[in-house]
Image (cartoon, helix red, strand yellow):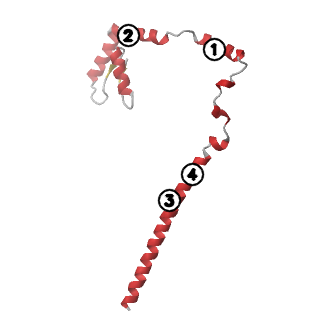
Amino acid sequence: MVGMPFIADQPMNIKRLAEVGVAVGVDYVTVTKNDLKSAIIEVAENKKYKINIENLRTLLQDEPMTSLEKAIWWSEYVIRHKGTQHLRSPTADISWFNYLLVDVLLFVLFIVVSILLVIYMVIKIVISSLKFARFKTKIKQN
């Protein structure tokens, strides 16, 4: 595999794959035509990459039972225990009020409205004090 990481966890993933010996990483910022070509040729012609990926596949596919055996076991499990109520999540039966977090939304709405009300009152007081100060200066001038 030739990897060219762009964002997030991709550089780390390519670095790990290169350490395991199944990939070669190239930097998209500094890569040249020759670098990319040599990376592709390296992976295509060097047999160590094929051997390493086959070993990795063997590790990842080693499971105690096949998918069909798992499906059969879980089907029999449900039949043996007459359902799976004990595996059901407790949140499956919550009310719509709790599911939609209405209490949290109301609290946030209350906080926002309170802040806006305080801002409105402060602005109203500042404007009224400015009007009073302006009125006071006009009286003194006369």
Where is residue 101? Give x, y as percent: 60, 44
Q: Residue 52 carries which label?
A: 2
Viewport quadrant of the N terminus: top left
* Residue 114 point in image, percent of width and height: 53, 59
Q: Foreground: 18 or 32?
A: 18
Which structural element holds mark 2? helix
In the rendered structure, the answer to whether residue 21 lies left or right of residue 83 reads left
Q: How far apart are marks 1 and 2 (CA)?
A: 31 Å
Which one is in front in this view, the residue at disc 2 or the one at disc 3?
3
**Which element carries disc 3, helix, strand or loop?**
helix
Q: Which of marks 2 and 3 is nearer the N terminus?
A: 2
Give whichever of discs 2 and 4 has the lower sequence position: 2
Query: Which SS class for mark 1?
Result: helix
Check disc 4 and report the residue beneath it.
Answer: 107
Q: What residue type is labelled 3?
A: Ile
The residue to which callout 3 is attached is 115
**Res. 135 image quadrant:** bottom left
Give how far apart the Cα atoms at labels 2 and 4 are. 56 Å
Closer to the N terminus: mark 3 or mark 1? 1
Q: Which dot marks residue 94?
A: none
Going from the N terminus, do you reach mark 1 or mark 2 first? 2
User: Marks 2 and 3, Cα distance to the nearest angstrom?
Assistant: 61 Å
**Quadrant of res 46:** top left
The crowd level at tag 2 (other Cα within 10 Å; few <14, some 14-19, many 20+) is some
